[in-house]
Amino acid sequence: MTAFMAACAAADTQQCHASPPPPPPPGIPEGVTHMFSTPLFRMKLVEPSNAADFFLTLESAILDHFRESVARCEEIALGAGQTPSDRFFSLQRDAFERDEDSFLMLAGGEVAAAFEQLKSGWLQNAQQYVAAAAGEEAAGAFFAKKLHMFVWASVHEGCSVHTPHVHENTAISGVFYISVPDGSGALVLDDPRGLRPPFHRNQISHHPATGELILFPPWLLHSVAPSCSTSGPRISLSFNILSEREGGQQMTDWEVLADTNAVITPLDGD
């Protein structure tokens, strides 16, 4: 403190704006702490029985665009190990990186209106999710930024899968299910604590339902099990929410859902 005051006095007529260093981060809180936890969010956002036309509108638009993509795949050679579903995703990602609207927005009419309604609901639930997981202050700070949402449609049929992966350069990931017939693949979430025993076999296999919304941290390893339904394809809309730096550069944002430890009631004793 003496050195700090001497530095201020030596500043002559200039006002000293220096401040003491911040306190060190806390160690282990008193009581039981769920450290390095992984927050997940699930809700039935739209009830299919009350919105049959809504789902049919989106399903038809997605399938039409997917079939067009598959037809182009027959004309353009796929990369090594690439499937039509992979190409479908790549086309949507490339359009987003070119700052183009989603094909669902470009469709206009009822399709675009349904898509906008969904995005609004996703954002509202995402803010509540971050507030519950990381605190109101973290949610307010993140959602005050200029945000982008990358949305892509996925169609799984013929026992297609999506191999384990994470979503980089984003803050929040989510998926909304448009059609989930019997035989559709589960959403598989891997234990984020690593591949070493005893965590290497820990997985959650969730069988989603039409109209369901799931939000999760983008750093959580996940995959889609084989979809072998004979009554129709498994159709979903996945999305990433990310912020923008000055100059238009997108931020990484992985830290938004990283500090989500939960402290339970302190216990007596050491």
Image (cartoon, rainbow, N blue to C red):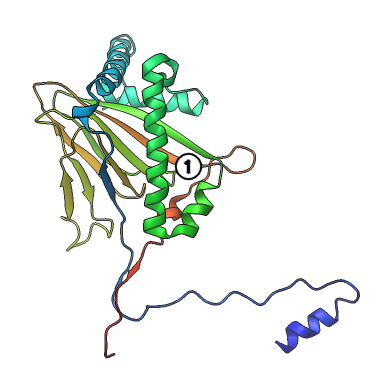
Question: Residue at (37%, 44%) from the top-left corner?
Answer: 125
Q: Amino acid at mark 1?
A: Leu
Compared to 209, does 55 lie above or below?
above
Relative to 44, is 91 on the left or the right? right
Percent position of residue 60, x then y: 27, 16
In this view of the protein, which residue sits in the foreground, 11 or 84?
11
Question: Residue at (49%, 47%) from the top-left corner?
Answer: 252
**Residue 76 placement: quadrant:** top left
**Residue 61 placement: quadrant:** top left
**Can I make out residue 50 in this image?**
yes
Percent position of residue 64, x then y: 29, 13
Provide the secondary structure element on which disc 1 rests: strand
Location of mark 1 (residue) = 242
Question: Residue at (41%, 62%) from the top-left corner?
Answer: 259
Relative to 139, is 75 on the left or the right? left
Percent position of residue 56, x then y: 25, 19
